[in-house]
Amino acid sequence: MFYEGIERHSGLFSEYTELRVQENRTCRVGLLNGDVQGNGSSVKGGVSARVHKDGVWGFASVPGRETEAIGRVVASATGNARFLAGREKRDLGRLPRRAATASHDLSTTKPRKSQKDLVDFARALDAYVLSKGKGLMTRSISLACLDMEKTLLTSDGSRSSSLVPRTILYVAASTEASGGGSVEFYDVYGGRGQFEDVFGDPAALYRDLDDLLERLAKKAEGIYPEAGLREAVLGPDLAGILAHEAIGHTVEADLVLGGSVAADFMGRKVASELVTLVDFAHTALGVTCPRPVWVDDEGTEARDAVLIEEGVLRSYMHNKESAAHFGVAPTGNARAFEFSDEPLIRMRNTAILPGKSKLAELIASVDEGYYFVRPSNGQADSTSEFMFGITEGYEIKKGRLGRALRDTTVSGVAFDMLKTVTALSDDMSWMCGGMCGKKQMIPVGMGGPAVRCRITVGGR
């Protein structure tokens, strides 16, 4: 960790100050049809300081971790804060201050693999897909590793350090569809941890790749759904992206202040009483979350934010400034992706809590509808209106799964659609590889159970 060299600069803090030293280490390998398209690694790190004075923030950052840079960046941020405070005059009072201390290092204890080892791993997977896939038009393998290491010191006594790694493998293949054209299918594997803890022998993934190719073949023979408002079962990945994109962003306090529809809904019913939605800090249902945050990038102890409780909107996600505005405690949702980024209110691990039904029961209860499993891209806005692409789905006929679906879309207004929820499965899972792009990319967790509801389906 980076404590050495930053603690002795606490004497420079003349105003409320946050000092952060951060390093992001990445490596990537990409294969397309067996050819290496990407193979590299990078390290990006530096020091940043943020100073609060009379309701405004001054920020400064410099690359590198030299000790003398720390003094310069604190002085620059302090000067920026004083300059702005002398002109804007918008003192909002004292920020919430509650010292937090934590240290978490999730790096592997195993010997590290070389970049060549990662390329060889990807080549082995590609060779297997090629040997098993029949009539493939394209195939791609992408491996991405990210280690985020941070040390934070604040003038109100917070001390935190963390190293949280993530390793994500993306495998995709396409083939000719019946009737012409092509279809593509993909899957994502991995999650929290460095490569050595997440993956081992490539053969351990062969069964998953067999399943991917089988589902691709079914999709090639698939049909287009009938457009309109339909009864559907959404798989956990769909529940996760719905929780994050369509609901989560509307209840980030900075977006609430910017005009989100959630500003008018506090304390009101916005979903079925079956729905409880939480942005978890670091642990969910006794298990460490995909992107755990113990202390956020303002030095606030991270705690779970219960956003919707039994259908009623109960809270927003806050940083220190928004918490002061609303007169509540900060939730520890201030996060920054790179050393040069200012912390913003961001989600951490957002999920709908499981219910009491089995997935098989949800499907069996639908006479005619669809089971949507895997989303692609999507979008939502501050009204909670959303549209998500669907790359894997199946028709449901008389309570049984039928033919696979071609690519389609689902859409709606989340705060209306959630009121149609009639059942949730009793288990939940997290999407692999979630990223959020609110002004700066950052890893997030999103998940949930299977959800039975009514949703608008796109047609051909």
Image (tube, grey):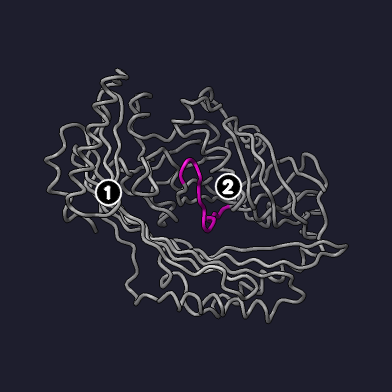
Q: Residues within 10 Å of mark 1 (few under 14, many from 20)?
A: many
Give the mark count: 2
Q: Residues within 10 Å of mark 2 (few under 14, many from 20)?
A: many
In the visual, does 345 lie left or right of 75? right
- Residue in the picture at 26% in, 20% down: 86
Q: From this view, report whether residue 258 is shown above or below residue 219.
A: above
Q: Is residue 148 magenta?
A: no
- Residue in the picture at 31% in, 46% down: 295
In the rendered image, residue 262, in percent from the top left (x then y), is placed at 53, 28
Sequence-wise, the earlier of marks 2 and 1 is 1
Q: Which residue in the structure is indicated by mark 1?
A: 47
SS state under label 1 = strand
In the rendered image, residue 181, in percent from the top left (x then y), is placed at 82, 61
Q: From this viewpoint, which residue is outermost toward the right? A: 179
In the rendered image, residue 54, in percent from the top left (x then y), is placed at 26, 23
In the rendered image, residue 447, in percent from the top left (x then y), is placed at 53, 51
Is 188 or 91 nearer to us in this picture? 91
In the visual, does 424 lie left or right of 392? left
Main secondary structure of the magenta stretch: loop
- Residue in the picture at 65% in, 73% down: 33
Quadrant that contains the N terminus: bottom left
Q: Which residue in the structure is indicated by mark 2?
A: 241
Magenta span: 426-440
Query: Residue 151, which numbered label?
Result: none
Q: Nearer the viewer, mark 2 or mark 1?
A: 1
